[in-house]
Image (cartoon, rainbow, N blue to C red):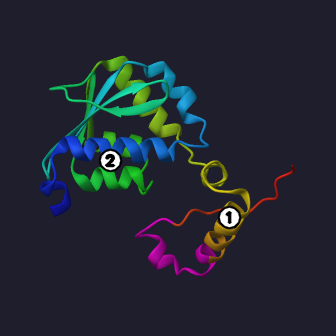
């Protein structure tokens, strides 16, 4: 948590926006985010404490300076970590009140439903961000790493389960 405390929230928001936008490459989610165009979201990590403010525009996240958002998602860092690594599904985290959504109800429900239906396509992401031969090699390496990583370790971090597939040109 120390790195989160050392830098201003605005710097974190910019870095997270860049990371979110990078991770969206090759995914179908950006087209579904367009329904939230112009909406602002605040992520509030309560135990650090820090607040990150974003605006969604054209399927992209932009860091903004704002006192509040249309929707605030709050909780401890561990809850956000479990959400990000898919160790817990969003419904469970919100039901157990490990994460909370406040603000515009319609926007909040839409965000929760997007999170709940999120199925990250690592294969498409690597194809979108890497030169095709390199993407193929990275996917092969990750598949082998996942096969040979003990299950006990896989509980603590996620190695994408990618079965390299051949692409037709």
Q: Which residue: 66% across, 65% down?
A: 139
Residue 57: which numbered mark, if any? none
Identify the residue position indicated by label 2 in the image: 15
What x and y, as percent, mark residue 85? 43, 56
- Looking at the picture, does residue 49 appear above or below residue 31? below
Q: Secondary structure at mark 1?
A: helix
Look at the image and say whether residue 157 sits in the magenta stretch.
yes
Is residue 59 at least partly visible in the picture? yes
What's the CA distance linking mark 1 and mark 2?
Answer: 25 Å
Q: Quadrant of residue 149?
A: bottom right
* Residue furthest out toward the front: 131
What x and y, as percent, mark residue 156? 40, 70
Identify the residue position indicated by label 1 in the image: 134
Which stretch is magenta? 145-158
Closer to the camera in the image, 60 or 161: 60
Q: Residues within 10 Å of mark 1 (few under 14, many from 20)?
A: few
- Side of 125 relative to 5 (left or right): right
Q: Which residue: 38% across, 45% down?
A: 92
- Looking at the picture, does residue 159 appear above or below residue 151? above
What x and y, as percent, mark residue 1? 18, 61
Closer to the camera in the image, 162 or 89: 162
- Looking at the picture, does residue 95 appear above or below residue 161? above
Q: Secondary structure at mark 2?
A: helix
- Side of 60 relative to 147 (left or right): left
- Side of 69 relative to 82 (left or right): left
Q: Quadrant of residue 134?
A: bottom right
């Amino acid at each position: 948590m120390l790195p989160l405390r050392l830098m201003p929230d605005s710097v974190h928001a910019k870095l997270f926006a860049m990371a979110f936008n990078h991770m969206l490459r090759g995914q179908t989610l950006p087209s579904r985010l367009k329904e939230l165009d112009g909406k602002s979201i605040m992520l509030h990590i309560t135990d650090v404490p820090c607040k990150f403010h974003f605006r969604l525009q054209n399927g992209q996240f932009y860091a903004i300076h704002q006192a509040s958002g249309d929707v605030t998602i709050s909780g401890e860092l561990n809850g956000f970590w479990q959400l990000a690594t898919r160790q817990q599904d969003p419904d469970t985290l919100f039901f157990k009140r490990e994460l909370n959504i406040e603000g515009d109800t319609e926007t909040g429900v839409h965000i929760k439903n997007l999170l709940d239906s999120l199925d990250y396509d690592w294969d498409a992401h690597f194809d979108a961000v890497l030169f095709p031969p390199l993407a193929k090699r990275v996917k092969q390496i990750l598949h082998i790493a996942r096969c040979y990583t003990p299950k006990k370790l896989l509980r603590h971090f996620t190695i994408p389960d990618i079965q390299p597939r051949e692409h037709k040109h």
